[in-house]
Amino acid sequence: MTETLLDVRDVVVEYPLKGFRKEPFKALKGVSLDIRPGETVGLVGESGSGKTTLGRAVLGLAPVTGGSIKYRGQEISKATRAQRKELSHEIQVVFQDPYTSLNPSMTIEQILTEPLTVRKVERQAANKRVAELLDQVRLPHGAAHRLPREFSGGQRQRIAIARALALDPKLIVCDEPVSALDLSTQATVLDLFIEIQERTGVAYLFVSHDLAVVRHLSHRVAVMYHGEIVEWGDGEQVTGEPEHPYTQRLFMAAPVPDPDRQAQRRADRLRLLDIQHQQNVQAGVA
Amino acid sequence: MIDTSIALPTQAAKVSLFRKLLTNPTGAVSMLVLAIVALAAVLAPVLATHDPGLASLQSVLAKSSPDHVLGADSAGRDVFSRLLFAGQFSLAGALLALVVAVAIGVTGGLVAGYYGGWFDSASSWLTGLLMAMPGIVILLAARAVVGPSMWLSMMIFGVLLSPAYFRLVYACVTAVRNELYVDAARVSGLSDFRIIGRHILTVVRAPVIIQSAMVLGIAIAIQAGLEFLGLGDLNIPTWGSMLNDGFINLYKAPTLVLWPSLVLGVVCIALTLLANAMRDELERSRGPVKRRRKGAAVADSAEAAAKRGEPAVVHPETPAGARTASAGEVLLEVTDLGVGYDQPDGSTTHVVNHVGLTVRRGEVHGLVGESGSGKTQTAFSILRLLPQGGRVTGGSIVFDGTDLARLSEKEMTKVRGKRIAYIPQEPMSNLDAAFTIGSQLMEPMRVCLGISKAEARKRALALLAKVGIPHPERTFNAYPHEISGGMAQRVLIAGAVSCEPDLLIADEPTTALDVTVQAEVLDLLRELQDELKMGVILVTHNFGVVADLCDRVTVMQTGRVVETGPVRTIFKDARHPYTKQLLEAILEDAAPRGPLTSNARPSKDGSLTSLTGVKP
């Protein structure tokens, strides 16, 4: 596999802090990964690990101060507004919160045609496209003339997915798209993600804190911790037999839905923490 | 899998602001008054009996007569006709001020709020300066320089009013600038102009309309004030100049001052009331109508009975499950619990129906369900802390021999905190940012246990150490924003167990936490529960947490209990279809996706086909 859709190399994102000559806050400290066409790359980490920042950097919503982000060989980390407009055809986004990612005062039709108006799509063609998109995310056509508040969380997330698909992108950045949803809704939305990928061949950068979700969806997985990628590789390997101590801790911390196996995992986790602590003491870190 | 995506809710009726105002009595009356005044001003040439500028020596200060309905002024001009024509100028002048203020203030606020940067600093500085300047002095100075022009002074007044709009719009824009839908629009490649027009202008529309009604009233009053001081243009009739004339002749013809002040007063009051009514309709929803007790109770039981549905699956105690935990005495017995919310139209929406729940001493009872299943409502009704409008509509909550549903608010206060404690979902929003952690821990202990400050401090420090906080002294003196979410949850757990309660209600205690922190908090809860032998109700949607901590599980769906039993039975032998669905949706044991195979990709060059099969 030689071709690469997105190539992220040593990316640094810094946010200036208030105060004279204060060191800026480094949200990303040199992060590298790549995404191939049609592939899902999972990005796991806890809050503050920088996983969302990486997604926003790819979208041009976070200030990249070092390194490069190349989309099909073209540098996009410093893209101008006009270049971004071209890129909107290629890279799209689905956000975490289905309640604030849709403008509450616009109908679903207006929300879905918005990206199309940038492309100057004819009114009639746009309406046809809206119907197609609603089909794709399994919502009835009657949804077009309603407001977001009339839909449940899962339905709203479907609308957000439809908006991302409107321009036929090659890459969708998914920022915790199912973490605000109920368990059973989450499962159906994840199935929808997989189904759309299999049909259209779109690639996902799938950001989540939930190891199980990432494992279910991702071909390759990167684990982030304090602004760095600590483990990166095959999904099966990273989520099954993690090598990095942090990934091991993360893996062990997730409770299994079975009382007896969970009791076992709890014991394993405490043992692992103990061993890691010993190692740290020996290494002189702690 | 539950397919909730297909069923669409019924279309909510879109009611325009105008319609809403018509049903609001204050709004309807004030709009009627304003419409009459505006109409009279527009139709002045038709309605007026005389030329407003025509002076007549015969009728100087004439009393009201068939010829002059409201009499005549000091120059013998007809008061009624002048009143009508003055309406044209007064209203147009006020509108001019409004238009100038809106144009400057809204544009400036949008640009400064959206882009920030130097324009933001400069314009904020300028608005500060404008607001600090005494308006009336500037208007007087302007009149001295450019002469008595009502239009010009109203334009200057508009500039002076613009900071009010600037501030309002600025606040609105900075609030929505970082909303996700604005980010999504940026990713879609929309121009800033379009984003402002489509997403941001809609947010500022309502507050600007409300503010405009207020500003219009102020503009009319200030304009009348200037004219009254004799600083206006004497060639055009205005309400202010009529007021001036009436005041000079107050002793000779007292009614002259009455008519313009009446019109001014009515218009200003109507505008203010209209602004209030609009604020009510746009920003606040009305509370529920007071219900009539007796009829409602009958309706309650009728609806509740209809919602009883099929009985829940109850698993018996298994020998394995009947270990130490469930052997204890019954601590809490909830039977046939109903919870309802009073609606504005007087009806009641039932969110919990016929819920039964038994918690024994020393047992952790998991309350599982998805959003809207009523699990949190059930927990809150045990604490008797239902949100505004909610109430227990039936059943009993027997806690250690007393029915909590029948206790007075005062008696309940003694139970809450001391005997039943609570751990919330969002640790940060449940600590008061204005007080130190220590004072928030000490206060309830001093009230509940009646101990001294020194004793409470000692206990609080011991508790902080007990919940695994590394530096209790430092955390004790810290403010909530100085500690992490996991630490905050430990503090709240410390507070909950501080009075050694018999029952602990934990509402999704780990949902807002990172998974590694969640594991630590679960360990802590297990230790404390073991040590204090509390009964625990654990509200959660995470089956991993259930497996980790619970002895018994109750599964809820749409306000009803569908299945209840020992934790192992629920996981291994679930009977109810809904429980099975939930367990199937768990991803923990699902197979990983595996590596990407090259034939999974649609075409070699990486171009993709859409649903319609047309290449983009």
Image: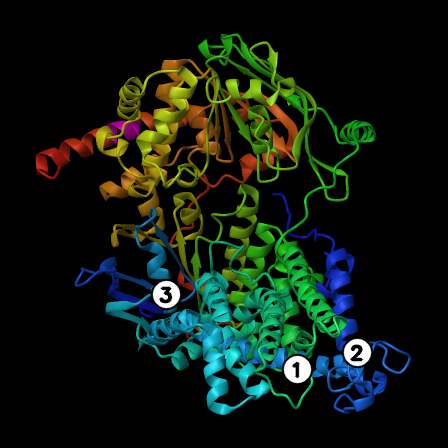
| Residue at 68% from the left image edge and 48% from the top image edge | B286
- Residue type at mark 1 is Ala
The reply to whether discs 2 and 1 touch (Cβ–Cβ < 8 Å) is no
Q: Is residue B500 visible?
A: no
- On screen, residue A189 above or below B196: above
The range drawn in magenta is A268-272
Of residues B205 and A46, the one nearer the viewer is B205
Q: Are marks 2 and 1 on the same chain?
A: yes
Rounded to the nearest angstrom, the CA distance separating label 2 from label 1 is 13 Å
Within 10 Å of the Cα at label 3, are there few (<14), some (14-19), or many (20+) other Cα atoms?
many
- On screen, residue A181 above or below B566: below
- On screen, residue B560 above or below A232: above
| Residue at 63% from the left image edge and 79% from the top image edge | B95
- Picture coordinates of residue A86 (x, y %)? 43, 79
- Residue type at mark 3 is Arg
Count every numbered label the image shows and give the total: 3
- Picture coordinates of residue A69 (x, y %)? 30, 70
Q: Is residue B321 visible?
A: yes
Of residues B515 and A129, the one nearer the viewer is B515
Q: Which mark is residue B40?
A: 2
Left or right: B447 in relation to A165: left
The quarter holding residue B476 reads top left
Which residue is under mark 1? B92
What kind of secondary structure does the magenta stretch mostly adopt? helix
Rounded to the nearest angstrom, the CA distance separating label 1 from label 3 is 65 Å
Quadrant in which the N terminus of chain B is drawn:
top right
Left or right: B247 in relation to A12: right
Is residue B268 part of the magenta span, yes or no?
Answer: no
- Sequence-wise, the earlier of marks 2 and 1 is 2
- Picture coordinates of residue B150 (x, y %)? 59, 85
